Image: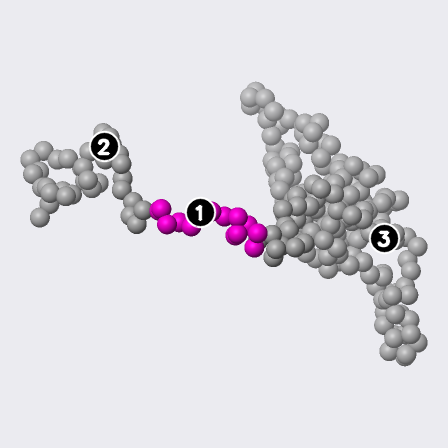
Amino acid sequence: ATAGVLIPEIEFELNEGGLDGVYTTVEGLIEKMYDRLKCVNPFPHGDAATKQHRTNDGEEFSDPCPRTKNYLQFLQTLDDMKNGKKFPYTMIISDPLSNSFIGPVPHHAVQISSADDDNHNCSLQNYVDPRIKMEPYERSFEQNEILGLNDINTENYREATKEHKVNCDFDGSDLPNHFVRLDTRRGPDHPHDVAKGTLDGDETVMGLGSA
């Protein structure tokens, strides 16, 4: 839920935190991004994509505009990646909170699990996939700002709080025990003390002068 996805070959970038948390495969992740794009941009699909008038001539339906064609082609490229029709491509998953887990392909996971059951000491820690590269990195200032970490004091915060209290001269003794409205004038929208309209012949006294 805190990771971002980048596919450089098609200039696709999903901001960090742009998807919900999910346990899936590479193909499943691409399908989720495909569905999300299709859901938030519904007009290039269905009748809205084929039965449209780009002008008010009222005649035959217009062809999709160039922007719509590029968008549909982009979705088709994502679909080809998911179905293994477009290779190679690079998927970069960047998680500033390190909440993402990358595991082996399913059949390798079964082999590792079976080996562990047989006490062959073949754990996930020893598993290496040459197609996966993991790089730790330090968060940028912008990432810390988005996560609200730049303003957090994590060192000597108790001493800083104590010093702040000692240096604070305000004790609240000069505050009034009640508040008085200084401006009692009423405008034309509220001529009475209560919200009651004026009717002809109505002599009802409202507000402070009422019984």
Name which of mark 3 and mark 1 comes first in the sequence: 3
Q: In the visual, does 185 lie left or right of 206? A: right
In the rendered structure, the answer to whether residue 122 lies left or right of residue 12 reads right
Residue at which label 1 appears: 170
Comparing labels 2 and 3, the label whose residue is closer to the camera = 2
Magenta span contains residue 138: no
| Residue type (three-letter) at the residue carrying disc 1 | Phe
Q: Nearer the viewer, mark 1 or mark 2?
A: 1
Amino acid type, residue under disc 3 in the picture: Met
Q: Provide residue 160's location: percent of width, then percent of height.
A: 60, 52
Question: At 85% from the left edge and 61% from the top edge, which residue is drawn?
Answer: 104
| Residue 36 in view of the camera | no
> Horizontal and vertical percent for residue 10?
80, 38
Work out whether mark 1 precedes mark 2 in sequence or the reverse, and give the earlier one: 1
**What residue does disc 2 label?**
185
Secondary structure mainly formed by the magenta segment: loop
Between 32 and 6, the one nearer to me in the picture:
6
Residue located at (82% from left, 51% from top): 136
Magenta-tinted stretch: 162-175
Against 53, residue 192 (above or below) is below
- The residue that mark 3 highlights is 134
Q: CA distance from mark 1 to mark 2?
A: 34 Å
Q: Residue furthest bottom?
A: 118
Which circle marks residue 83 in the picture? Answer: none
- As measured in the structure, the alpha-carbon distance from the residue carrying label 2 to the one carrying label 3 is 69 Å
Task: Determine which quarter of the picture holds residue 12.
Answer: top right
Res. 149 visible in picture: yes
